[in-house]
Every structure is written in structure tokens, then in C-alpha cells.
């Protein structure tokens, strides 16, 4: 799945085994979001302070192992419990499932959903 969603995006896969271990059992949408967030992090890093000194070719984006790890950390952070629920990350490697929805949210009860 990782290779499919990666496409032609250049990603440093030196830490990929750990990322895959931590995301074991997640859905395809979770992996897609992981790669998207890693790419956004790389783009922000690329455009940040010192960008001119790095002399990166225009249009070239390279996702580092650190970008990938940061994206995993962000998605698995407890504050992103709702994102994990929506993206279907209930696997063992995705960390503990939240015991309940975040404050102020609740699952609909029987008969509350209308077709």
C-alpha cells in the first residue's frame, strides 16, 4: 500500500520498517493521509528559514525519514483520536483505541440515524 500511495514522491525509507510496525493493521486511507502529511511537513520544512541557502531545485520535494516519523507521531497522537476513527486505524500497531469519543461528541443511538 505504501508504494501505491507514494507514487513518484521521493521518500527516504530508512525508517520505514518502524513506521510500518507502528501502523500495522491500518486502512489504505490512513496510509494515504500519512504520506500526505509527511509531504506537507517536507514542503513546510523546505520553505522555512534557510530555504534559499539549501538551494533546492524548484518543484523538487523530498520527504525525509524524520518527516515520515513526524507524520506518524501526529496521526497516532491522542489528540487525533477522531482522525484515527475516521481513517479506520484500529490495528494493534496504531496504539490503543480511544475508550470514548472526544468531549462533546457521541455516537448516535439506535433509531437516530435516518436513511
Image (cartoon, rainbow, N blue to C red):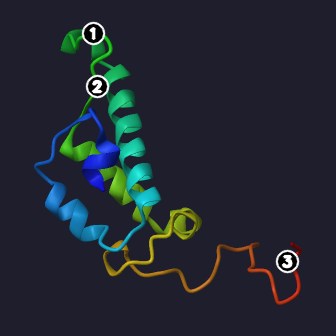
The residue at which mark 2 appears reads as 61
Q: Nearer the viewer, mark 2 or mark 1?
A: 2
Dot 1 or dot 3: first in sequence order is: 1
Q: Position of residue 7 (x, y in %)?
A: 30, 38
Q: Is residue 11 left or right of residue 93?
A: left
Residue 40 in the image: above or below residue 13: above
Residue 1 falls in which quadrant of the image?
A: bottom left
Residue 52 in the image: above or below residue 27: above
Label 1 packing within 10 angstroms: few (<14), some (14-19), many (20+): few
Query: Which residue occupies the extreme left position in the image?
Result: 14
Label 2 packing within 10 angstroms: few (<14), some (14-19), many (20+): some
Which residue does the image show at 17% across and 55% down from the upper left?
Answer: 16
Q: Nearer the viewer, mark 1 or mark 3?
A: 3
Dot 2 or dot 3: first in sequence order is: 2
Q: Position of residue 115 (x, y in %)?
A: 86, 72
Can see residue 96? Answer: yes
Residue 42 or residue 10, whichever sits in front: 10
The residue at which mark 1 appears reads as 52
Dot 2 or dot 1: first in sequence order is: 1
Query: Contact (CB < 8 A) between labels 1 and 3?
Result: no
Which residue does the image show at 85% across and 77% down from the upper left?
Answer: 113
Amino acid at each position: 500500500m505504501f508504494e501505491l500511495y507514494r507514487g513518484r514522491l521521493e521518500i527516504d525509507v530508512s525508517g520505514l520498517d518502524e513506521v510500518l510496525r507502528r501502523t500495522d493493521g491500518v486502512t489504505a486511507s490512513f496510509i494515504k493521509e500519512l504520506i500526505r502529511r509527511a509531504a506537507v511537513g517536507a514542503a513546510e520544512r523546505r520553505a522555512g528559514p534557510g530555504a534559499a541557502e539549501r538551494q533546492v531545485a524548484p518543484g523538487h520535494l523530498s520527504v525525509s525519514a524524520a518527516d515520515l516519523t513526524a507524520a506518524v507521531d501526529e496521526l497516532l497522537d491522542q489528540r487525533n483520536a477522531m482522525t484515527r476513527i475516521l481513517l479506520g486505524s484500529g490495528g494493534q500497531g496504531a496504539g490503543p483505541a480511544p475508550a470514548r469519543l472526544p468531549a462533546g461528541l457521541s455516537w448516535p443511538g439506535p433509531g437516530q440515524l435516518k436513511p
